Image (cartoon, grey):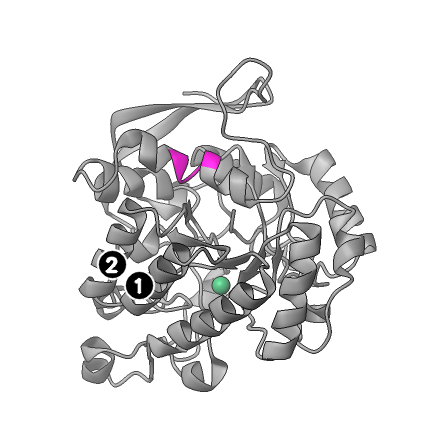
Amino acid sequence: MHCHLRIPGFPEREDLATGSRAAAAGGFTTVVPHPNTRPVIDNPVVLRNLQEQIAKESLINVLPAASITVGQRGEELSPLSGLAACEVPLFSDDGQTVASAALMRRALQAARQLKIPICHHNQDKTLAAGGAMYAGDVATRLGIPGIPASSETVMAARDIILAKETDGHIHICHVCYAPTVELIRRAKQEGVHVTAEATAHHFTLTDAAVAERGAYAKINPPLGSQADVDAIKKGLQDGTIDAIITDHAPWTATEKDQDIRTAPFGLIGFETALSLVFSELVNPGVLTLSEAIAKMTINPSRILKGVSKGRLNVGADADLIIIDQEKKWVADPDHYQSKSRNCPYRGRRMQGKAVYVIVGGRIVVAP
Ligand SMILES: [Zn+2]
């Protein structure tokens, strides 16, 4: 329910052919690309064009999200009801924050009427400004400007307050830090309409990865501490975090091979996520196999508007994967289907892979 295919606008990073092949290779039959493209997906005409292109060029189901605000500039709302009429699964300004509480409040009011979630990249830009990694001991040691966990938590708190008041559905994007997990847990207990997702990176790596991999471990919000990783696992376990996402964010080598201070934020994730779910969550007993699968299938389907996926029964879409849980392989970005190589796991021993991927009854990946 959260990835970036870079179409339209940035075909040098990814396109529909490579992006959908990479997703399929990782076992994904349906993905939701977020609208931080050029142009931004902020009106029905651009959305329709993209949907038509997808119908022609994609190997899998691609359901594009639309932006909350025009141009993702956080100044005025996109035509949300017009977009909703074009089968939008969620609204997101991902990569940008809707800094205005008044605008977010109106977005949540509209979301309530349209029954579409508002997916927010929760980050207070005044707290995050200038930072390149998590503001912890590693940042201090490396002398790299840090981004504190509070940058996420204060914005999530604001959105939860607004969701409670408006009864709109807030979906907290890529939860990274322990205090945010606790905040969402309490909000759910109070009956606020809040859901949440976590990336595979954020329950696998800590800020220590930045010392080893540099910009190849630079993601936004940044990888946190071990306590944050533990909190995300606990949140996945007790249902506070509903969904597991990739936040697949391709960048060219030229863009990513820079000093950590100047390189862009983002990592690819389609081709490694499933294996990381096994190694970090299923094999150690954090989640049962069916709980883990639910967080990548039925749970996202329930959160997204108008999506009826993740069910295995008569009459359901024949979107199926067959997983070899024992299959051993080594992460090698040079052999990925994605056009980009910005993966922090090069050389890591992986276990578990989708060996068959079937979309709408058609085999798109086979050994
Ligand atoms: Zn984001």
- Name the side, left or right, on which 102 lies relative to 196: right
Query: Which secondary structure lies at badge 1?
Result: helix
Q: Residue furthest top?
A: 314
Q: Residue at x 36, y 43 (%)?
A: 273
**Front-most of 253 and 267?**
267
Residue at the disc numbered 1? 182
Question: Considering depth in this image, is 165 or 106 the residue closer to the camera?
Answer: 165
Mark 2 and mark 1: Cα distance apart in space: 8 Å
Q: Is residue 49 above or below residue 97?
A: above
Q: Which residues are magenta?
A: 294-298
Between 250 and 168, the one lying in front of the other is 168
Q: Is mark 2 within 8 Å of ligand 1?
A: no
Q: Earlier in the sequence, mark 2 or mark 1?
A: 1
**Res. 157 image quadrant:** bottom left
Residue at 73% across, 35% down: 56
Q: Secondary structure at mark 2?
A: helix
Magenta stretch: residue 296 in it? yes
Mark 2 touches mark 1? (CB < 8 Å): yes
- At label 2, the amino acid type is Ala
Note whether residue 175 is visible. Answer: yes
Q: Which mark is residue 231?
A: 2
Residue 291 screen position, x and y as percent? 32, 35
Query: Is residue 11 or residue 51 the one in the foreground?
Result: 51
| x and y percentages locating residue 27 in the rendered image | 44, 33
Instruction: Look at the image and tell me in which quarter the C terminus lies.
Output: top left
